[in-house]
Image (tube, grey):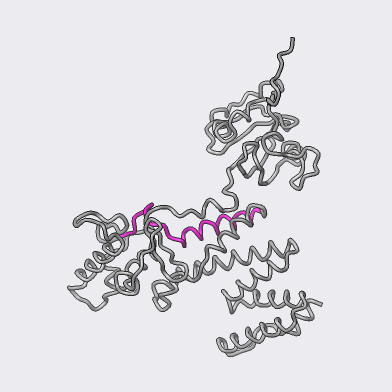
């Protein structure tokens, strides 16, 4: 006699499954840091590792189907259509695509067929929902060095004109040289080149003042939480000082690497997040400091790659308005990049904005002549003819 099911209660039926093939790599499979599922024909779960159990819970027990877990559309009618396991079996491999898990979380999913040809391994990596989670700033000292320098400690702004004086400049130098110990001799050479024997005292006094500005409640003799003394020099405390330039670079590298792999769906959110994070030139309030120039140019070049990538993605999708916004920002960031300027002007012409294109070309022409004493390598007529 069948047991009655209370009204409103959902029954999850698990299909009987055969034992998966003997896996000599079973221990390695279970130890993978990423969630992994072994699937058979029809997307049937044959095995899961510990990370998959933690991510998916009891839903991923053997006998479940991938479509139940990943929101696949076996009918093929959804935008990201088709069962991912069946697609992998047909094509041999499925690149990263985003899925909404049954438990409500988002994840990036990729699939590959095993050598047997009838079993698929799914890899799942939790998604940060297009960088939203990365917006949170950790506690400690937060240094916003993109644009004019701003400081926060535990989300409280640190104000004062002292950032333009020696203690503030020492902090900016440590930010510029983050990740290593800056020696006393180096600081003397940069900031007190003619101080002689008294120079070391000047460095120590400036460091002491810097620590007091950052930690006004610190007791006398107590070690600094942010500016650490090392043998022969100083460094910013790893893990206690958050710098927006590092956050920007991490997002940019993630997006550019995904773009290089052709994973557009994953690349665009990271690149968009990086573009938002780039608030201006590195240490813009130190425009003439030679020690900041190399890092400033490196990060600006990275920002240009981000904007160029975003423009390409949007234009390829037929979104000329958004593509134009990214191109315009790229053209302002790199005013002497003729390729970017020409692409922007061509887009303006395609969109029927001829007066705007003419003004942009004349601006580029004046800048180029002023800098190099010659005409740019293209004329407006050439752009018009190439776009015809």
Q: Position of residue 95 (x, y in %)?
A: 68, 46
Looking at the image, the residue that sits furthest to the front is: 7
Q: Is residue 252 magenta?
A: yes
Instruction: Look at the magenta stretch and give its main secondary structure.
Output: helix
Q: Is residue 366 above or below residue 162?
A: below
Q: Residue at x 68, y 75 (%)?
A: 344
Residue 156 locus on image (x, y percent): 38, 60
Q: Which corner quadrant holds the C terminus?
A: bottom right
Q: Nearer the viewer, residue 156 or 110?
A: 156
Magenta stretch encompasses residue 43: no
Q: Residue at x 64, y 63 (%)?
A: 310
Name the residue rendered at 58%, 36% in the picture: 35
Q: Residue furthest top?
A: 1
Q: Quadrant of the N terminus?
A: top right
Magenta part of the chain: 235-262
Residue at image coords 39%, 72%: 291
- Of 323 and 303, nearer the camera is 323
């Amino acid at each position: 006699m069948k047991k009655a099911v209370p009204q409103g209660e959902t029954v999850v039926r698990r299909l009987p499954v055969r034992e998966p093939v003997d896996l000599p790599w079973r221990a390695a499979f279970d130890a993978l840091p990423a969630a992994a599922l072994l699937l058979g024909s029809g997307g049937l779960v044959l095995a899961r590792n510990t990370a998959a159990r933690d991510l998916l819970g009891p839903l991923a027990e053997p006998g479940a189907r991938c479509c139940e877990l990943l929101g696949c559309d076996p009918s093929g009618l959804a935008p990201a259509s088709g069962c991912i396991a069946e697609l992998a079996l047909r094509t041999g491999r499925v690149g990263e695509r985003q899925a909404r898990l049954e438990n409500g979380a988002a994840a990036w999913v990729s699939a590959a067929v095993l050598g047997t040809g009838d079993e698929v391994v799914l890899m799942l990596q939790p998604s940060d929902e297009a960088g939203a989670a990365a917006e949170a700033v950790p506690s400690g000292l937060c240094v916003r060095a993109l644009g004019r320098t701003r400081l926060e400690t535990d989300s409280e702004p640190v104000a004062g004109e002292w950032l333009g004086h020696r203690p503030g400049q020492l902090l900016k130098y440590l930010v510029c040289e983050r990740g290593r110990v800056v020696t006393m001799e180096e600081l003397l050479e940069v900031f007190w080149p003619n101080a002689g024997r008294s120079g070391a005292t000047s460095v120590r006094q400036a460091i002491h003042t810097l620590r007091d500005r950052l930690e006004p409640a610190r007791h006398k003799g107590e070690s600094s939480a942010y500016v650490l003394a090392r043998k022969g020099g100083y460094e910013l405390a790893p893990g206690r000082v958050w710098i927006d330039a590092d956050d920007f670079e991490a997002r940019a590298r993630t997006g550019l690497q995904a773009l290089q792999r052709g994973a557009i769906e994953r690349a665009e959110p990271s690149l968009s997040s990086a573009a938002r994070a780039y608030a201006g030139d590195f240490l813009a309030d130190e425009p003439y400091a030679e020690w900041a120039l190399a890092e400033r140019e490196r990060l600006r070049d990275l920002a240009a790659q981000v904007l160029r990538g975003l423009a390409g993605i949007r234009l390829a999708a037929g979104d000329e308005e958004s593509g134009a916004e990214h191109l315009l920002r790229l053209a302002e960031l790199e005013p002497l990049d003729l390729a970017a300027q020409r692409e922007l002007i061509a887009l303006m012409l395609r969109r029927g904005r001829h007066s705007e294109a003419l003004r942009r070309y004349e601006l580029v022409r004046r800048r180029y002549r002023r800098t190099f004493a010659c005409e740019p390598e293209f004329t407006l007529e050439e752009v018009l003819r190439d776009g015809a």
